[in-house]
Amino acid sequence: MILSYPPNYYSNVEMVDTAVCSESEKMREAYTRMIKHYFLPISTQQANPETRFLTLKTQWEADTAILSSVTEIALHPAYQQIIGMGHTAIRLILLEMKKRPGHWFWALKSITGEDPVLPEQRGRMKEMTQTWLRWGREHGYL
Amino acid sequence: MSVEEIEKVFPNLRISGYSITSPATPEYNCIAWAAGETESWWEPDPLSLYYWPSNIPRRYTAEAYIKAYEKIGYSVCNNPADEEGFEKVAIYIDTHGKPTHAARQLSSGNWTSKLGQLEDIEHSKLDDITGLQYGSVGVIMKRPRKE
C-alpha cells in the first residue's frame, strides 16, 4: 500500500516554540529535519535553500562536535556545500548565529570576501559573532 | 554529544573513569583551555580568523604549539608525573606530527581536557583519550604553579 499525504500536510505540522536550552533546540531541529525528510520530495528539499541549509548544518554539527581544529571543522563536506550555496547562505548563517554561536566565520569570509572582525576580537566567539551580525544588518541581510 | 558517544570515541574513558566538568561550548577549544583560557579559541588557522599568540608561526606543528605555550611560561619536560609546585600541559600529536589536542594537569594530578566543541572532562591518565581521534601524547611541558 502506498501512503499518501495531502499536499499541505507539512505546513499543518506546528512546532510550539518552547525550547529554552540547546539540547531542546537540537531535538527540535532533528524533529523538523525528520519531518521534512519524510514528507518533502528530495527535489523540493534540494530546491529549498532553508531546508538544504538545515540539513547540511545538522550533518556538519553532528560530525564535527568532537574536533578541536577549525580547519578540520570547516573542511567538512557539508560545510563546504554551505559555502557553495554562495550569497544565499549568508542570511541563513547570520540567522543561525543570532540563535547560538558557531564556527561560521570561515564560511562568511569565504563567501563575502570580507572580514569585519578586528584583530583584538580574533578567537572571541561572542565578539566575532556580534561583529558579523552588525555587518549583516549594515548590508541588509538581517 | 551524549556520554555514550563520548565513550564510543574514547573507549579508555569508560575503563578509567572520568567526570564531565562543564557544559558544551564552542567558545574555546582544548588548546585555549590547557592555557587556562575560556574566552577565546586558540588556533593558527590559515585565514587568521582565530587567536594565536603574536609572533608565533601560524602552523599546525608541534614546534609552533610549543612556542605558544612557552610564551605563557611553560617549558618542555619529559615527565607527565605530578610534581609539587608545577602544572603541566600535554600536547597530543597525530601520526603526521600535527597537534590534535592539549590537556592540562590539575593540582590533584588528574588531567582536564576540553573535547572539541563539547564539554570539559577530568580524567586520570593521559592515555584515556589517546587513539584515532587525538593520536598520542607527543610533548609534555611544565611551569611553576600559581597559587
Image (spheres, rainbow, N blue to C red):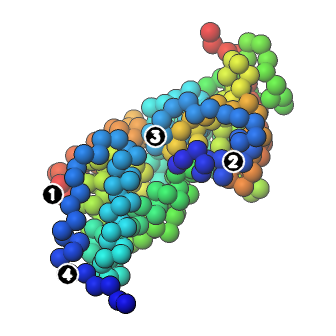
Q: Disc 3 versus disc 2: distance between alpha carbons?
A: 19 Å
Q: Where is residue A54 in the image (x, y as percent from the top left)?
A: 35, 64
Q: Disc 4 versus disc 3: distance between alpha carbons?
A: 40 Å
User: Which quadrant is the C terminus of chain B positioned in?
Assistant: top right
Label 2 is placed on what type of residue?
A: Phe
- Regarding mark 1 in the picture, which secondary structure is present there? loop
- Between B77 and A7, the one lying in front of the other is A7
Q: In which quarter of the image is residue B144?
A: top right
Q: Which of marks 4 and 1 is nearer the N terminus?
A: 4
Please report the residue visible at 20 percent of the width from the left and 61 percent of the height from the top. Answer: A14
Residue A48 lies, with reference to residue B102, above or below; the image says: below
- Regarding mark 4 in the picture, which secondary structure is present there? loop
Label 1: few (<14), some (14–19) or many (≥20) C-alpha neighbours in 10 Å: few
Q: Disc 4 versus disc 2: distance between alpha carbons?
A: 46 Å
Q: In which quarter of the image is residue B66?
A: top right
Do the residues indicated by labels 3 and 2 lie within the same chain of the protein?
A: yes
Label 4 is placed on what type of residue?
A: Pro
Please report the residue visible at 18 percent of the width from the left and 68 percent of the height from the top. Answer: A12
Q: Position of residue A27 (x, y in %)?
A: 38, 53
Q: Quadrant of residue B145?
A: top right
- Regarding mark 2 in the picture, which secondary structure is present there? loop
Q: Disc 1 versus disc 2: distance between alpha carbons?
A: 45 Å
List the residue tagged with mark 1. A140
Which of the two marks, 4 or 1, is nearer to us in this view?
4
Query: Which mark is drawn over residue B10?
Result: 2
Label 3 is placed on what type of residue?
A: Thr
**Chain under label 4?**
A
Q: Disc 3 versus disc 1: distance between alpha carbons?
A: 29 Å
List the residue tagged with mark 3. B25
Q: Which of marks 3 and 2 is nearer the N terminus?
A: 2
